[in-house]
Amino acid sequence: MPTYDYRCDLNDRVVEVHHSMNHKIQTWGELCELAGIEPGDIDRIAPVTRQANGGNVVKSSSLKNNVPAGCNPEACCGGGGCTLDG
């Protein structure tokens, strides 16, 4: 199952969860239940927002050629000192 990051609008906390692509999490209570965490003092109906990265990050060290997709180390990173690396 895909991994997604959600941010609570009230406490600014980011929580990573796994769920199917068509599942929609809208509240802090739903997120806490799925993640198996306590909601604490935050209202369970507080809205949450799915983050753009979705929790699926690929490190350049895991790539075959060790260069992030779309990166030209010669042009953008000073000859191999890529800031996107690791």
Image (cartoon, helix red, strand yellow):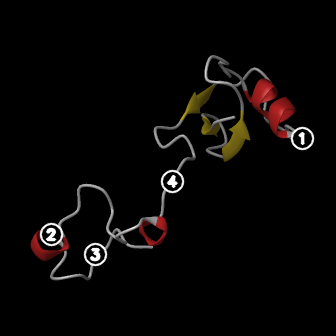
Please determine whether, in this image, residue 55 is positioned above or below residue 18: below
Distance from disc 3 to disc 4, alpha carbons, whole Å, reads 17 Å
For the residues labelled 3 and 2, say whether their Cβ atoms are less than 8 Å apart.
Answer: yes
The percent position of residue 29, horizontal first and vertical second, equals 81, 26
Q: Secondary structure at mark 2?
A: helix
Q: Earlier in the sequence, mark 2 or mark 4?
A: 4
Give residue 38's mark.
1
Distance from disc 3 to disc 2, alpha carbons, whole Å, reads 8 Å
Of 46 and 21, nearer the camera is: 21
Q: Secondary structure at mark 4?
A: loop
Select label 4 or label 1 by which is in front.
Answer: 4
Q: Which residue is tagged 4?
A: 57
Residue drawn where x is 62% and y is 16% of the image? 22
Quarter of the figure with residue 75: bottom left
Around disc 3, counting alpha carbons within 10 Å, would you say few (fewer than 14), some (14 to 19), or many (20 or more)?
A: some
Q: Earlier in the sequence, mark 1 or mark 3?
A: 1
Q: Secondary structure at mark 1?
A: loop
Give residue 76's mark.
2
The C terminus, quarter of image: bottom left
Dot 2 amino acid type: Cys
Quarter of the figure with residue 67: bottom left
Dot 1 amino acid type: Glu
Dot 3 amino acid type: Cys
For the residues labelled 4 and 1, say whether their Cβ atoms are less than 8 Å apart.
Answer: no
Residue drawn where x is 87% and y is 42% of the image? 37
Quarter of the figure with residue 11: top right
